[in-house]
Image (cartoon, rainbow, N blue to C red):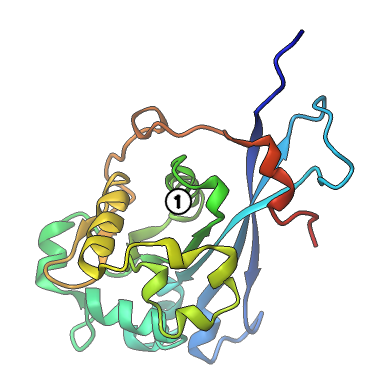
């Protein structure tokens, strides 16, 4: 008698929706920042028979990031701080890496990334969420690796501020608190921050001094998918598949 399948392999795909303000004649900071909302989807093998209440596509997580088009802003004779003034997240990141008065990287950033140009674009990774069933499988690393590959062309730096979701303001009141089971995460801020930072350092991110920001230069050699131990698919328990959000909008 054949063994009953306990897990199912899901092929991973990333679907991005880009938001831009005006198409022509950029006048506002938002016109120089692309806001990208991404969804991480898993698709079972079409030959596998599933129960009627399980969709073929299941939502495994989300990623939100920004592309600050520094080169375009400077081309329109806008000051550097103007380009980063679109959102609180971009403003804070901009001041963490730039000396805005002189429109140069901070000396420490220049020292860390000597080949990075202050006139290049900046890719800012903002918020990543992974469904509990898909955690512990290096899915976050796989997604960020892909985004850096696809979106960092023309960028001087890729920047992030690793921040455990359970410590966000009013995190326990947000809609995804229960769905993401954030209450099961470590209550120790020190431990949670350190663990998250080490996780992202696998991709080559380095901490900028004593700030909360980490960065990498996409022109530098980065870890391969083999070294990162990431792939195009993950396995999840078949019995729990129907607990994942499904059906693409």
Judge from the rendering whether residue 244 lies leftward or rightward of residue 61; answer left or right.
right
| Residue at left offset 21%, top offset 56% | 206
Res 88 quadrant in image: bottom left
Residue extending furthest toward the bottom: 27
Judge from the rendering whether residue 53 lies leftward or rightward of residue 187; answer left or right.
right
| Residue at left offset 55%, top offset 80% | 174
| Residue at left offset 31%, top offset 47% | 219
Q: Residue 26, how many percent across, how many down?
A: 56, 86
Q: Looking at this view, is 145 or 196 the one in front?
A: 196
Q: Is residue 87 above or below residue 246?
A: below
Q: Is residue 36 visible?
A: no
Q: Is residue 168 above or below residue 195?
A: below
| Residue at left offset 32%, top offset 52% | 200
> The N terminus lies in which quarter of the figure?
top right
Of helix, strand and loop, which one carries label 1?
helix
Q: Is residue 149 visible?
A: yes
Q: Looking at this view, is 187 or 247 the one in front?
A: 187
Q: Which residue is mark 1?
A: 144
Q: Residue 172, how many percent across, how many down?
A: 48, 79
Q: Residue 203, how many percent across, how many down?
A: 32, 46
Res 234 quadrant in image: top right
Label tally: 1
Q: Residue 240, how many percent across, how many down?
A: 67, 44
Residue extending furthest toward the top: 1
Judge from the rendering whether residue 101 lies leftward or rightward of residue 235; answer left or right.
left
Q: Is residue 130 above or below residue 19?
A: above
Judge from the rendering whether residue 22 lies leftward or rightward of residue 186; answer left or right.
right
> The C terminus lies in which quarter of the figure?
bottom right
């Amino acid at each position: 008698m054949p063994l009953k399948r306990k897990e199912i392999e899901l092929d991973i795909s990333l679907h991005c929706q880009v938001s831009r303000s005006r198409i022509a004649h950029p006048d506002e900071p938002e016109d120089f920042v692309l806001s990208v909302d991404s969804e991480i989807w898993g698709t079972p093998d079409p030959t596998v028979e599933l129960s009627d209440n399980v969709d073929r596509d299941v939502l495994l997580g989300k990623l939100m990031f920004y592309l600050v088009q520094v080169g375009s802003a400077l081309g329109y004779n806008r000051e550097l701080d103007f380009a980063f003034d679109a959102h609180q997240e971009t403003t804070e990141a901009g001041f963490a890496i730039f000396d805005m008065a002189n429109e140069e990287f901070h000396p420490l950033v220049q020292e860390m990334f000597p080949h990075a140009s202050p006139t290049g674009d900046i890719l800012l990774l903002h918020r990543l969420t992974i469904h509990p069933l898909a955690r512990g499988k290096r899915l976050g690393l796989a997604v960020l690796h892909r985004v850096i590959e696809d979106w960092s062309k023309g960028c001087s730096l890729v920047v992030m501020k690793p921040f455990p979701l359970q410590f966000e303001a009013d995190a326990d009141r947000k809609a995804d608190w229960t769905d993401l089971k954030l209450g099961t995460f470590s209550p120790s801020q020190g431990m949670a921050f350190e663990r998250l930072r080490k996780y992202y350092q696998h991709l080559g991110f380095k901490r900028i001094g004593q700030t909360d920001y980490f960065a990498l230069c996409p022109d530098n050699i980065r870890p391969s998918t083999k070294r990162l131990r990431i792939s195009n698919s993950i396995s999840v328990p078949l019995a729990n598949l129907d607990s994942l959000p499904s059906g693409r909008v």
